[in-house]
Image: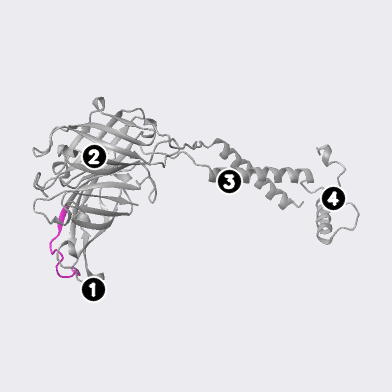
């Protein structure tokens, strides 16, 4: 073998060894399959888009279920119908929306083996909300977990139907995404 | 040292070799004493083969990806395509815009169907039945809190090329956005999607209203 070929072979061998080392050392995910589902599949951080067409209410939320039927924290920003809470373009968004934080101590969720579950969330009105904002309220959601779990076994998407968004007593719908 | 099983094996024994094999043997003889032995050559090939296997494992095995723990304006950056529905889905729009990662915008364009504003729908010129608005970047801003919830003030002004029936005045829309915890470039670290709630699409209701939608990379 010529010197050039020898050097090339050495280089190739070093490169190969490096790749092998990376393959062994890089943290890898374990494949998790569902069903059966459990509360553990609904965990960590989700952002949600909620709508309640009959009352003209919409909202975005961030919730952090803990994988064991409770929540670590949550935030909700609600947009109301203009007839209930008039929009003022001269003030910042904080004053045109209604803000709420989740009370984790009195909120909970369940997930059945078939991936359907129930959330009971108690949302506490943030001090300083506009006077037209509803006060603290209880939101109940029926959730359907999708099967596209991530490497850690947490679902990426949840579809939901809700009742009583912003205490309006009307049915609504939405989804939560990782 | 050459393993026993390889000792005594001479692939270049003086027999009637086919021409390519004979050439190979001649080359090997020429290189004898210059560098790598047959054993070393095979060892290098074996390591390289293992390396290729490793590379394939690196590329094919699902890996644990990094997640954002503390959000900022920088996580909302680059180009996003958005859809909004408003006032119990009565009004709708699509838009694309470029938050700059620092609380401002590089540009933005919104398009809504003309029949958001006038009826009946004109079938004679379907492609012309839309109203375009441009984002006034100097008067628009956004802010993202550490928890990934942000808000936006967006000033949209109508294009002078809009067909008759489109609004002739601009409007201020205000939104709250919730950023997903999955990032993708460009630029690196930008959220792939934001959920949106808004209050004043098209400025069409004097009291404002509620809308919602999403923006995707």
Label 3 sits on a secondary structure element that is helix
For the record, the magenta segment spans B160-172
The answer to whether marks 1 and 3 mark residues whose Cβ atoms lie closer than 8 Å is no
Q: Label 2 neighbourhood size at 10 Å, few (<14), some (14-19), many (20+)?
A: many
**B217 or A84: which is nearer to us?**
A84
Q: CA distance from mark 2 to mark 1?
A: 41 Å
Label 2 sits on a secondary structure element that is strand
Badge 1 and badge 4 both on one subunit: yes
**B123 or A96: which is nearer to us?**
B123
Q: Which residue is mark 1?
A: B125
> Any mark on residue B56, and which?
3
Label 4 sits on a secondary structure element that is loop
Q: Is A41 placed left or right of B90 in the picture?
A: right
Q: Residue furthest front?
A: A114
Q: CA distance from mark 1 to mark 4?
A: 80 Å
Q: CA distance from mark 1 to mark 3?
A: 54 Å
Q: Is B3 placed left or right of B125 in the picture?
A: right
Report the residue at 69% width, 48% height from top. A9
């Amino acid at each position: 073998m010529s010197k050039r070929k020898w050097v090339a072979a050495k280089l190739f061998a070093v490169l190969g060894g490096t790749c092998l080392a990376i393959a062994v050392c890089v943290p890898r995910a374990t494949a998790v399959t569902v069903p059966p589902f459990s509360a553990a599949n609904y965990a960590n951080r989700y952002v949600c888009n909620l709508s309640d067409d009959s009352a003209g209410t919409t909202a975005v939320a961030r919730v952090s279920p803990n994988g064991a039927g409770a929540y670590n924290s949550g935030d909700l920003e609600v947009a109301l119908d203009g007839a209930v809470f008039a929009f003022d373009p001269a003030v910042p968004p904080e004053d045109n929306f209604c803000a709420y934080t989740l009370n984790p101590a009195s909120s909970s969720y369940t997930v059945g083996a078939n991936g359907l579950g129930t959330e009971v969330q108690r949302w506490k009105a943030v001090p300083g909300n506009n006077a037209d904002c509803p006060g603290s309220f209880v939101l109940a959601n029926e959730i359907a977990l999708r099967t596209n779990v991530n490497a850690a076994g947490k679902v990426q998407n949840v579809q939901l139907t809700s009742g009583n968004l912003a205490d309006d007593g009307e049915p609504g719908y939405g989804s939560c995404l990782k | 040292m050459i393993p026993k099983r390889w000792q005594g094996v001479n692939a270049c024994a003086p027999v009637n070799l086919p021409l390519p094999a004979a050439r190979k043997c001649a080359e090997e003889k020429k290189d004898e004493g210059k560098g790598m032995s047959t054993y070393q050559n095979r060892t290098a090939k074996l390591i390289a083969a293992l390396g290729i296997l490793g590379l394939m494992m690196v590329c094919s095995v699902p890996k644990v990806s990094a997640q954002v723990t503390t959000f900022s304006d920088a996580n909302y950056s680059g180009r996003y395509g958005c859809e909004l529905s408003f006032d119990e889905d009565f009004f709708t729009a699509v838009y694309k815009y470029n938050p700059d990662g620092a609380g401002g915008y590089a540009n933005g364009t919104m398009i809504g169907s003309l029949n958001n504003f006038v009826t009946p729908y004109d079938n004679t010129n379907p492609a012309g039945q839309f109203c375009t608005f441009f984002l006034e970047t100097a008067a628009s801003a956004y802010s993202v809190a550490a928890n990934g919830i942000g808000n936006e003030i967006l000033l949209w002004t109508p294009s002078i090329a809009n067909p008759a029936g489109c609004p002739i005045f601009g409007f201020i829309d205000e939104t709250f956005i919730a950023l997903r915890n999955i990032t993708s470039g460009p630029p690196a670290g930008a959220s792939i999607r934001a959920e949106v709630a808004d209050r004043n699409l098209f400025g069409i209701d004097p009291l404002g209203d509620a809308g919602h939608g999403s923006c995707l990379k």
